[in-house]
Amino acid sequence: MSDQNPLPGAQSVQRAIALLRAVARRNDYGARLSNLANDVGLHPATARRLLSMLSAEGLTSFDPVSKLYRLGIALYHLGSAAKLFTIREEFHTILEKIAEETEDTVFLIIRSGNDSICVDRIEGKFPIRALTIDVGVGRPLGIGAGSLALIAFLPHKEFETVVCANAHRYKSYNNLTPDIIREMAKKARKRGYVLSEGLFWPGVTSISVPVFDPNKNITAAITVTAISTRMTRERQKKVADIIKRHAGRM
């Protein structure tokens, strides 16, 4: 490794990154300090100091019994954040087109464990806007049209696993119950999309459609939300068809 770098501390950063990459290459079985130091051409004492710093930040982990280093949990969280950014970039243009066509607010919702997260929102041109959730805000899966769309179309066993796990949380949202969530999901499967008419947010109607990948896994849900007086029965189906048409191009 080159020692020539005009930026103070840059050499340490480069060495730390090199060690992180070396840990990644040996992650399946774990890596010993001597191997890592040899991989990147560092004295073991220097490698130990840098690895201690990486472990303190959660980027690596060290097992004092086996004396092995592995990648840390912080990298998982960074990877999850990068995934959110990638999904948002992939869908953003589609959301803009749906917002332009419906003139209403469009949300992109994804799953994170037993929660859903809003990762993007595009506001339409209609003067009265229903901004039911902000980007970055999470909800228990099942709460909100988009959140429900993420699980309503899952196999029954998977759906029930999530609903049972979140059952104790639903009461905090307008005293909703697992049975109400189950009934909404049942109707959604028959209809082909989730319809929420003032249930989660009074005076607001939401239409949400799940988006499937080529392996038929649900990757996200796209939701269009408007004031209920704007969402007639005829328009509800029209909006659902618009979402499906654009989502089908992903």
Image (cartoon, rainbow, N blue to C red):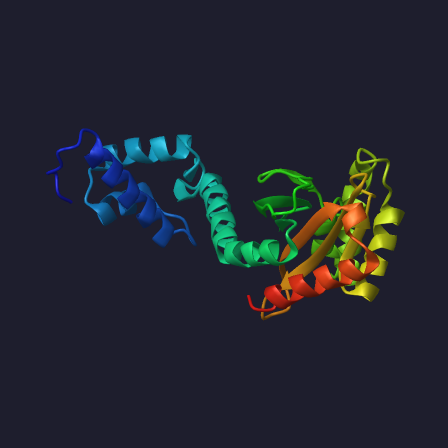
Between 36 and 34, the one nearer to me in the picture = 36
Q: Where is residue 23 in the image (x, y as percent from the top left)?
A: 35, 47
Q: Residue at x 72, y 47 (%)?
A: 226
Direction front: furthest residue? 127
Q: Is residue 216 left or right of residue 23?
A: right
Q: In this view, does 52 lie to the left or right of 18?
A: right
x, y percent for residue 21:
32, 48
Residue located 26% across and 36% down the image? 13
- Residue under the point 81% across and 64% down: 191
Quadrant into which the C terminus falls: bottom right
Q: How many marks?
A: 0
Q: Which residue lies furthest to the left in this view?
A: 4
In which image quadrant can residue 44 be found? Answer: top left
Q: Quadrant of the N terminus?
A: top left
Name the residue rendered at 70%, 65% in the picture. 241
Residue 199 on image: x %, y %: 83, 43
Foreground residue among 121 and 123: 123
Answer above or below: position of 56 versus 249.
Answer: above
Residues 180 and 70: in front is 180
Nearest to the observer: residue 237 or residue 28:
237
Residue 86 point in image, percent of width and height:
47, 53
Q: Residue furthest bottom?
A: 214
Q: In this view, does 175 lie to the left or right of 74?
A: right
Say which quarter of the image contains residue 168.
top right
